[in-house]
Amino acid sequence: MDIVNFFESQRADYLKAFDMVKTKLSQDEFTLFAEPLDEEFSEDGASLFSFFRHDFLIQTAESDAYFNTDVNVNPTIFEASQIAFYNSIEIILKSFVWNKCVFTSDRDIQPEVLNNWYSESIEPANTSTDVTIKNVIHSLIYQDTKQIVIDFGSATTDRLRSLLQVFQDAGLKKIIIESGYE
């Protein structure tokens, strides 16, 4: 399995669904913001990775009320686990969905190892508030020392590859990747 092409196709599926939702919502009488950073979630500062992004924030025409919506993509589920390698890391793919990836490692992942990657991945180079994609992740949830969950949002596959490089640099040898939507 060519893991890079697989990740590219999964991102393309997500972006296609994102664009379909954007098109549908744009036809209604809403003010639409793409990939806003949820400021309220981060107020307590208790979590190392406390910011997250929704796919869309919508303001209704008749009021100042806001609501959010997220794009859902069906996961790719394999009958048998797929094995691939990224440099020296063995990757076992059980299932996959771009916007809720569960990474389980053979060794502990210290949260500090993820700090720089997270900071570079959550902040967009494009800071406009229009409905263009920002090429950013939407969240990183540190489940425990061996498991994290990432919504890759509109991030490029370079973000995923750089995460795998972070794992390799941290000494991980095996990663199991599966969808968080099963």
Image: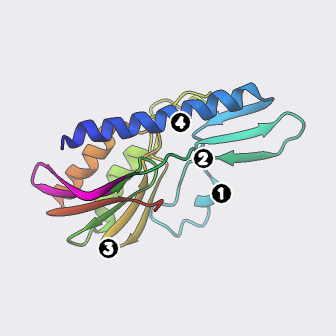
Q: Nearer the viewer, mark 4 or mark 1?
A: 4
Query: Do we see residue 93 in this rendering?
Result: no
Which comes before the other along the chain, label 4 or label 1?
A: 4
Residue at the spot of label 3: 145
Residue drawn at (33%, 52%) of the image: 116
- Residue 180 pos. (x, y %): 44, 61
Query: Do we see residue 1 in this rendering?
Result: yes
Kindly identify the amino acid type of the residue bearing the numbered disc 3: Thr
Mark 3, secondary structure of its residue: loop
Residue at the spot of label 2: 70
Residue at the spot of label 1: 40
Residue drawn at (55%, 27%) of the image: 132
- Residue 21 pos. (x, y %): 62, 35
Q: Judge the density around disc 2: few (<14), some (14-19), many (≥20) Cα neighbours within 10 Å.
A: some
Q: In the image, which residues are magenta?
A: 77-94
Q: Residue furthest right?
A: 62
Classify the position of the N terminus by image quarter. top left
Rounded to the nearest angstrom, the CA distance separating label 3 from label 1 is: 26 Å
Q: Nearer the viewer, mark 3 or mark 4?
A: 4
Mark 1, secondary structure of its residue: helix
- Residue 164 pos. (x, y %): 23, 51
Residue 88 in which image quadrant: bottom left
Which comes before the other along the chain, label 2 or label 4?
A: 4
Rounded to the nearest angstrom, the CA distance separating label 2 from label 4 is: 10 Å
Residue at the spot of label 4: 17
For residue 70, side relative to residue 170 (left or right): right
Q: Nearer the viewer, mark 2 or mark 4?
A: 4
Rounded to the nearest angstrom, the CA distance separating label 1 from label 2 is: 17 Å
